[in-house]
Amino acid sequence: MTNGAGGQTALATEAARNLATTTKTVPQMQGITSRWLLRLLPWVQVSGGTYRVNRRLTYEVGSGRVSFSTTGEAVAVVPPSLAELAPLRGLAPDDVLTALAGRFTQAEYASGQVIVEEGTPADGVVLIAHGKANRTRVGKYGDAAILEVLTDGDALGVDALVDPEARWDSTVTAVVPTTVLRLTREALQAVAAQSPVLAAQLEAYRAAPAPATNRKGEASIELASGHRGEPELPATFADYETSPREYDLAVAQTALRVHTRVADLYNDPMNQVEQQMRLTVEALRERQEHEMMNNPAFGLLHNADLRQRISTRSGPPTPDDMDALLSRRRKSRWFLAHPRAIAALGRECNRRGLYPEPVESQGALRHAWRGVPIFPCDKIPITATGTTSILCLRTGVEDEGVIGLHQTGIPDEVEPGLSSRVTGIDDKGVLSYLVSAYYSVAVLVPDALGILENVEIGR
């Protein structure tokens, strides 16, 4: 009925809703992502909580990747990291390494300047402290071929520290403004003259014969082939690492708290405890994927072999860079990249007039390179300077690849490797659940995982 000019003539919807049952959704969550790393990895049951990766014996001579500290424009070597250089491998006294670090001299090179030239005498080691440089060598037809791209922490001329006859086997040219640190052979000998420990270390390095290895650095298995008659065959065995790496299952946990009044009175039409648990589990899985990518102890970004890390040649991810990454391993299963890195690769392909064919994977068409699908992962970080990384993985135990580790069948399990255990009700009537996820990730052999680093996404 009319209640005067401009008055209400019918029941308002606000009041009507009090007598009606609304149609509603379960609680929504923006933080849920596709989590392709968790979905694509083959998972291995770790019943004992620890997974040991046995490998053939590999002769480690140092990664050659050195760390630096900066004070204003001055750059200094972090002394303990010098032990990564082959002649100094295993050298422990801090005072000796500190003395060596103090002997480095700093030099700056502009883009296009030559840092070292092929064929000239090598008088010591050169460390790339910051920047990027191309190592090139004149090829068969007179053109300069790029052998590798050097970035922060790479070392040149390590053997020149102990070999007075050493010469540079290639030319190194700065691609961008680059800071290098040099340690001459004379400076090293001056420190060695005052340190018997260092002198003995260098002498042992000169005298030690190079161990017989295959191209992957593993101890060789002696074989004979192409012979005739009955020659004496070589005797051999496959040696193993004496201290293999062990992966302990990591844990992500939280204490979910729900008031019993809410659990008792507000469970129609949706179970409040069930919805709280669902959202908590989603958050735990997101954290699990983040840790599997970024954890310093076992995360993929921190545990890729240094020899399987390459840098982009010019900044953006070009087809040449993707080929270089793909060619370093057999049976590459998939790439992982930040969505913005995938977009940057698309721009580079468009610039060259290339249109890579998508491939069908996981029930849908995916971006791909050379038939290997590229999956997005927003857990790969983007630095403040606008660079990120692209990962290439071979997976599975059968192929000696990357695998996920978990333990199923744990008490109060709600999902594989994830449990929800009631811990009690406090004196305020709050019900508590301990929600735990156990996981890890292992790289069975070094070349199962490769990383393209310094990928610019904003150009």
Image: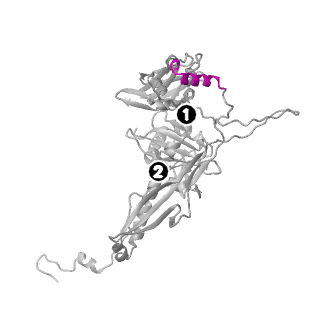
Q: Position of residue 401 (x, y in %)?
A: 60, 48
Residue 216, quarter of picture? top right
Q: Residues within 10 Å of mark 1 (few under 14, many from 20)?
A: some
Hey, what amino acid is under mark 2?
A: Glu
Hey, what amino acid is under mark 1?
A: Ser
**Magenta region, mostly helix, strand or loop?**
helix
Against 253, residue 138 (above or below) is: above
- Is residue 371 in view? no
**Residue situated in front as seen by the camera: 173 or 8:** 173
Q: Position of residue 58 (x, y in %)?
A: 64, 37
On screen, residue 26 versus residue 137, left or right, reads left
- Circle 2 residue: 291
Residue for point 57% across, 20% down: 162
Residue for point 43% across, 23% down: 102
User: Label 1, label 2: how many angstroms apart (C-alpha)?
Assistant: 25 Å
Mark 2 lies on a secondary structure that is helix
**Residue situated in front as seen by the camera: 421 or 398:** 421
- Magenta span: 192-208
Residue for point 64% across, 46% down: 54
Residue 104, quarter of picture? top left
Residue 199 in the magenta stretch? The answer is yes
